[in-house]
């Protein structure tokens, strides 16, 4: 089966090589990393390039930052999502403002209470159907269960059922602390289809970025730790290089 499975191209130079062709369609991938490791940028690039390079509409659920801030951040890399939103190819679901503030009033998709799973799922389904989305990003999924860790696995399964069921492929960013092993808790780690971990480590007096694919259902993949850079055009992964930490 593996070989025939349709792949979703990441839009991140070097990444599809590491994944031996891309992310198997309908997989939900946990993108784990400590602060500043590049999770948000990776997720935004996956969604933006999905639209402009592969004609696959994308939905981003914003839980960590104001949608206005996200649009500004993305513009830094030359990713103008306003235009894509107007064309109905990209949607941001505001699960950050709780509908508070004048800027929030202008958002098309708002979740008034992100703790209300039914509301979140309803808005997500509407956005996916409205634009015919093929990709979904949740930044971060940790925010959904940080105060209720017992429910983490259930929440991830519920989202996975909806997203995968509607034919989409997803990236869920997961926050871990500096020096923490693992990816965001046992329930979550087993529930997702794939895990990519981003790291920032001090090597010879300098912080170095690297990533490793820990699991990816439906495909073989590189087991090496690959260095990557964040540039003015986004993330570039060096598929032909290995970073040795010890
Ligand atoms: N234009 C740029 N060029 C190079 N590096 C950049 C650029 N913009 C941001 N960065 C780097 O990206 C980092 C932020 O990445 P990002 O927001 O994706 O991290 P994150 O993993 O989501 O972090 P957190 O969990 O703290 O939100 C910054 O700390 C900075 O080092």
Image (tube, grey):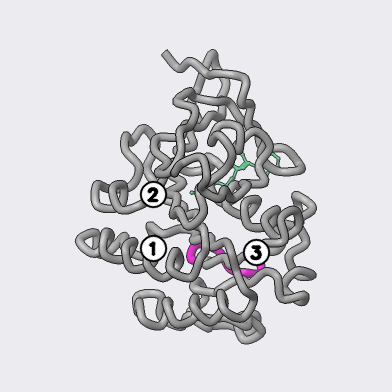
Q: Does residue 39 belong to the magenta stretch?
A: no
Pointer 2 local density, CA inside 10 Å: few below 14, some 14–19, many at least 20: many
Residue drawn where x is 62% and y is 83% of the image:
108
The residue identified by callout 3 is 69
Give whichever of discs 3 and 1 has the lower sequence position: 3
Q: Which mark is on residue 160?
A: 1
Task: Check if mark 3's residue and mark 1's residue have beta carbons within 8 Å.
Answer: no
Would residue 28 be found to the left or right of residue 88 on screen? left
Residue 34 sits above or below residue 151 on the image? above
| Residue 156 position in % (x across, y down) | 34, 61
The overriding secondary structure of the stretch rendered in magenta is loop
In the depicted view, which residue is nearer to us: 89 or 172? 89
The residue identified by callout 2 is 193
Label 1 element class: helix
Residue span colored magenta:
63-68
Give whichever of discs 1 and 2 has the lower sequence position: 1
The quarter of the rendered structure image containing the C terminus is top left
In the depicted view, which residue is nearer to us: 218 or 215? 218
Pointer 1 local density, CA inside 10 Å: few below 14, some 14–19, many at least 20: many
Q: Nearer the viewer, mark 3 or mark 1?
A: 1
Residue 96 sits above or below residue 184 on the image? below
Task: Check if mark 1's residue and mark 2's residue have beta carbons within 8 Å.
Answer: yes
Q: CA distance from mark 3 to mark 2?
A: 30 Å
Q: Which mark is on residue 116?
A: none
Residue 142 sits above or below residue 125 on the image? above
């Amino acid at each position: 089966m593996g070989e025939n499975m349709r792949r979703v191209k990441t839009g991140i130079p070097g990444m599809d090589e590491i994944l031996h062709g891309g992310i198997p369609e309908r997989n939900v991938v946990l993108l784990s990393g400590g602060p500043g490791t590049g999770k948000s940028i990776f997720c935004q690039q996956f969604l933006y390039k999905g639209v402009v390079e592969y004609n696959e509409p994308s939905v981003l659920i914003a839980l960590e930052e104001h949608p206005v801030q996200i649009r500004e951040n993305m513009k830094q890399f030359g990713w103008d999502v306003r235009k894509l939103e107007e064309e109905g190819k990209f949607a941001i679901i505001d699960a950050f403002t709780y509908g508070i503030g004048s800027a929030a009033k202008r958002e098309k998709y708002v979740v008034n209470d992100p703790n209300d799973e039914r509301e979140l799922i309803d808005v997500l389904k509407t956005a996916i159907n409205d634009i015919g989305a093929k990709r979904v990003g949740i930044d971060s999924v940790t925010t959904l269960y940080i105060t209720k860790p017992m429910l983490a696995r259930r929440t991830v399964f519920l989202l996975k059922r909806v997203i995968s069921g509607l034919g989409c492929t997803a990236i869920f960013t997961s926050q871990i602390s500096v020096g923490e092993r693992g990816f965001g808790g046992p329930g979550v780690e087993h529930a997702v289809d794939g895990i990519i971990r981003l790291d920032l480590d001090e090597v010879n007096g300098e912080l170095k970025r690297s990533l490793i694919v820990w699991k990816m259902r439906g495909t073989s993949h590189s087991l090496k730790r690959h260095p990557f850079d964040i540039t003015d055009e986004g993330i570039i992964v060096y598929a032909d290089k290995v970073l040795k930490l010890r």
